[in-house]
Structure formats: structure tokens, C-alpha cells
Image: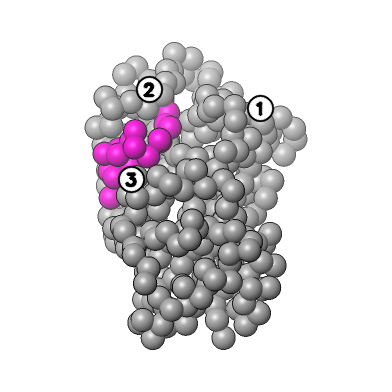
Amino acid sequence: MLTFQPCTPQSCEPLRNADSLLGPRGCDASIINLCSWQHLYNSSIARYKEQFILRFNYEGRRAYSLRFRPDGLSDLLAAVREDAAATNEKLCILGVNEDLLPYYIKAAPNLQASYNEDNSDYVYERQALATLAGHKLQSKRNFLNRFHRNYPNYVYKPLEEKDVDACLALDKSWIDKGLTLGHTNEEINERKTIKYAFDHWHELQAIGGVIYIEGQLVAFTYGAAINNDTFDVCVEKADTTFEGAYAAINNEFVNHLPMQYIWLNREEDLGIPGLRQAKSTYHPAVRLHKYVLTEQ
């Protein structure tokens, strides 16, 4: 029988040393998201023969995400299938990227794959976001240059504990102005994740940045690694009365990240038109599809 523990920085720590295992590369796979969204998805983790199983509540049923050895997947799927059967459910695997599909189809040919474009991640080349070079990103350079001209004395620095209250106040102002996703429950859930990240900052190995203008916080962002070369940008908020603040926090943050991260995952658009437009105008290098595999 599998023994699951709630996803916390401590229970998920072994995932940091699981580079030899195959697994998803989407934003859902980052430890910071597994832990900070635990309150909503009841995320939990179990170890099985030196492989890992993540379990979630997904659309009213149990669903799983696996970190596996190619030669161990069939055995692992059997254990997960038994766990799902405990609640009379069929096997459901989340967040499977295209390069992993052949392993699953070989191990369990009756799995059917589907994906929703709204849940596909936007992945960017770090260098492209850092330089904003080329015709495609001209408009972003214009926004950034305008910000530099209008606010020449702005200050960018790493996000620290002393900035947390100001960040939470800026997030609240988003809610008060109706600039969030527009759904009360989603606003509450996102705020819980932000608060969790700040409360467990060092354990989650989070990295963030802030911009101040004349002592006023106008933008903040943060995230954490998905793997050794890909960084997940979890949250980005800015005061839109400062034109170009989004372009500025995006550019500054990318330019201050450790050089090992050559890819930036800026997560999904959730089918929200404004988010889709904002993410598309930065011209992602990859739309990372995350397949759902269900057993027929």
C-alpha cells in the first residue's frame, strides 16, 4: 500500500535529487507550486521503489503525476492503478509532456491522451527576454525604454522579507481594483499561495524581485526552479499606473536570475483572453502541452 504525505517543502525535498528520473517539465512540476497550491488540490507525495508518485484532487477525482525510471514505469502504474481503485476510479495521469508519451503508451497501451490548450505552458528563451532583441519584441523594448525615461531613479532589488508586506498590499490592490482573474474563489486561492510562498520562502528556494519608485513598491515577481535549466515564474504583479512597470519587472528579473536557467516557464493562460495576449506578445519559444492520460 502506498503511503502519501501532504506536499510540503520537507516531503518534496527528495524531488530535488531525482534528476535521474523522468517526469513532467511543466509549471505544475515545480516544488513551489506543488506546495503552495496544496490547500486547493490536496497534493500529496509517496515514494515507491525509489520512484515518486504525486496525487491530487482533479475535477472531483484522484489524479497522479509520476517521476519514474523507464524500466520501472509498468510496475509504478500498477501501484497507482491499485490506489485509484480504492475509490473506484480509473487511472488518470496529469502533466505528461509529449516526449514522455511513448513511455506511457508502451507501458499501458489502453491510456488515452488529451490536452487543453488553455493549460499549455508558455516557455521562453531566457536570452530573448533578457535582451528583447529583434523586430518581434520591438513593442516590449518600447515599453521598457519609456519606463526608463519616465522613472530614471527606479530601484530594482531582490525580494526580501522586509518587502513582503508591501507585496501583499500591492496584491490586495489588484483585488480591490478588479484586476485579478475576476473570480472571487480564484482570487482567494491565489492569495493563499502567495502568502504560503512568503511564509516558506527559504525552504522553497524561491527567488524574487521588486521595483520601487521613490519608496513606493510598484512591481514584484517570484518563482523557483522546475529543474536545473528551467525556472518557473509563479507570480508577477505591477501597479499599472506606472506605464511599463510589467516590462521592467520582467526584464530586470530575467537579467538577475542565476545564469544556469536558460528557459523561463511563465505558466498557462487558463483561457483568459488578457493573459493569453500578454503571454503571446513575448513570443514563447515553446507552447508546452501537458497531456492528461486516462485509462479506458
Residue closest to the eye, 108 or 207: 108
**Magenta stretch in the rendered image:** 192-211
Which-is-in-front pick, marks 3 and 1?
3
Residue closest to the eye, 278 or 36: 36
Residue at the disc numbered 3:
10
Residues under labels 3 and 2: Cα distance? 33 Å
Is 144 situated left or right of 7 in this image?
right
Secondary structure of the residue carrying tag 1 is helix
Residue at the disc numbered 2:
212
Residue at the disc numbered 1:
131
Q: Position of residue 30 (x, y in %)?
A: 47, 48
Of the numbered discs 1 and 2, the one sitting upstream in the chain is 1
Secondary structure of the residue carrying tag 3 is loop
* Residue density around tag 3, few if under 14, some if 14–19, many if 20 or more, within 10 Å: few
Residue shown at 53% from the left, 18% from the top:
149
Considering every residue shown, the one lying at the far right of the view is 135
Q: Position of residue 271 (x, y in %)?
A: 52, 62
Q: Amino acid at mark 1?
A: Thr
Rendering quarter of residue 68: bottom right
Residue closest to the eye, 73 or 225: 73
Residue 3, above or below 220: below
Q: Position of residue 144 (x, y in %)?
A: 57, 27
Residue shown at 52% from the left, 47% from the top:
18
Q: Which mark is residue 13?
A: none
Residue shown at 28% from the left, 32% from the top:
164
Secondary structure of the residue carrying tag 2 is strand
Which-is-in-front pick, marks 3 and 2?
3
Q: Amino acid at mark 2?
A: Tyr
Q: On the rendered image, what quadrant is the C terminus found in?
A: bottom right
Q: On the rendered image, what quadrant is the N terminus found in?
A: bottom left
